Image (cartoon, helix red, strand yellow):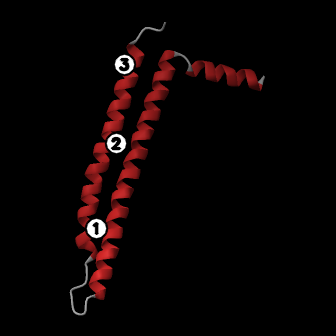
Amino acid sequence: MLLAAARHRVARWRQPRSAARLARALWIAWSVIVWNVVFDHVIVVAGRRYIAAAGRAAAAPAGPFANMDDWMRPAVTRGFWIATAAGAAVLFTGLAAVHRAAREKPR
């Protein structure tokens, strides 16, 4: 009984409309994940560069210290735009592919 219900649910997902809806949802989720990973990567790289610069500034005898805001604020803006471009590219590609696949006649 339980196995039959599971087979019925899976069979519904294999219908063209449900499959396209599921594929769209998965592509949207994938684009959100890509956005988060790219944004995090840009922030991490900026943080590492700040730490290196702060270490060099601290080793200098009388130089000015590296200000974290001077390094991280531009990184947040840069990360936002890079991540948005990457997420949009994934989203556009995925939704266009699903749209094209949904229009084709089944063989």
Q: Secondary structure at mark 3?
A: helix
Residue assigned mark 3: 100
The amino acid marked with disc number 2 is: Gly
Displayed quadrant of residue 91? top left
- The answer to which of marks 3 and 2 sits earlier in the sequence is 2
Q: Amino acid at mark 1?
A: Met
Q: Which residue is mark 2?
A: 87
Residue identifier under label 1: 72
- Quick one: label 1, few (<14), some, or many (20+) residues within 10 Å? some
SS assignment at label 1: helix
Quarter of the picture containing the N terminus is top right
Q: Quadrant of residue 14?
A: top right
- Name the disc covering residue 35, or none: none
Q: Residue at x 49, y 16 (%)?
A: 16
In the depicted structure, whether residue 61 falls above or below residue 24: below
Whether residues under marks 3 and 2 lie with C-beta atoms below 8 angstroms apart, the answer is no
